[in-house]
Image (cartoon, rainbow, N blue to C red):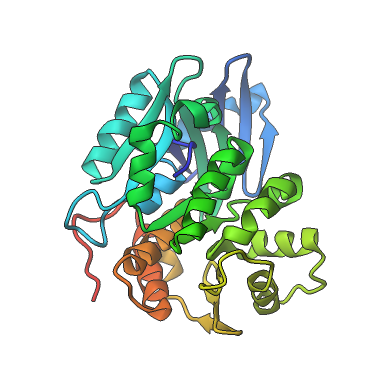
Amino acid sequence: MRSVSSCSITLMPGENSGSRCYVTISGSHSRKQVCLCSGGLQSATKQKEAAITATRIHKSSLGKIEHSEQQWMIQKPHKVATFFGCIGTDQFGQILKQKAEEAHVDAHYYEQSEEPTGTCAACITGDNRSLVANLAAANCYKKEKHLDLDGNWELVKKAKVYYIAGFFLTVSPDSILKVAKHASEHNKIFGLNLSAPFISQFFKEPLMKVMPYVDILFGNETEAATFAGVLGFGTDDIGEIAKKAQNLPKENSKRQRIVVFTQGKDDTVATVGDKAVMFPVLDIDQNDIVDTNGAGDAFVGGFLSALVQELSLEECIRAGHYAANVIIRRVGCTFPEKPNYQ
């Protein structure tokens, strides 16, 4: 469940455009030309605006959580996953509903007319990326107008596994806490993703209010390092960070917290019992990497597909590695019709 639902545009530089793309970002109160650079964002000069003509543009849809919930690994039965989010009453909102249906996700959106459906531009240069998001409707999710409705809460109660992105801490932390406490009280599995370094840096208070209810904590190496720094772990060793995160206070003592940190092309680290164990990713030729945007979402999606089938942690990670390996060979978080996974 997450309110950040969005359509996205992937910009891939042409042969003569170097490593930068330029795109016009329109919001509620402003419109400006920006430069998307690897690891950063700059305003663009008028002399550079022509660079966009050398750019290949690909449009896709679904937000971070929806990427993870696309029912590709499981195939059937359909609509194993239910998604809550917020969209606008516009064309992009209709696209999201259509794409969720095609992905066999049981999506229940809070639709409002104050803000348009969120959008995001991603610049892909080699195996690097830069993102610019117009969250818009994603910031408009209202617990009392959606999650608290009897019909929606009944759907929550039927679920056995919950997964929420850390981004949602900036929108409706009360919604996260309500779901997290329900999971803890009924010994269900609650997963949370650190999502981005700024979540730990600027939303530490709501993050740590939720942490005692987290059964599975996901993140990448950068998010893990920032999280460790904010909490004063006193180490930059990712295995030690995982163990310290595992040992943070926890409400439901029936489940030992599992921490999973991905590291791109390097080994994924996960807590197994009281140890941090490294799991090698699948080999891939660098020339076969097309678009890394959504790789983390795909990893979680593969992981959860095995988790809901009650497979081992090792199998969950293997499924996650497979899903991520497939999508980085394609533009956007997209998949072939059926997985070739055994």
| Quadrant of the snapshot with the C terminus | bottom left
Query: In the visual, does 162 lie left or right of 99?
Result: right
The percent coordinates of residue 50 (x first, y second) are 54, 27
| Quadrant of the snapshot with the N terminus | top left
The percent coordinates of residue 102 (x first, y second) are 22, 41
Task: Give the total of numbered labels.
Answer: 0
Query: In the visual, does 41 lie left or right of 108?
Result: right
Give the residue drawn at x 22%, y 69%.
340
The percent coordinates of residue 142 (x first, y second) are 52, 28
* Residue 192 visible in the snapshot: yes
The percent coordinates of residue 230 (x first, y second) are 79, 58
Give the residue drawn at x 32%, y 38%.
107
* Residue 7 visible in the snapshot: no
Q: Quadrant of residue 63?
A: top left
Give the residue drawn at x 17%, y 56%.
77
- Image position of 215 with respect to 333: above or below: below
Q: Quadrant of residue 82?
A: top left
Which residue is farthest front? 185
Foreground of the two, 49 or 273: 273
Foreground of the two, 108 or 147: 147
Foreground of the two, 49 or 280: 280
- Image position of 259 with respect to 334: above or below: below
- Image position of 163 with respect to 254: above or below: above
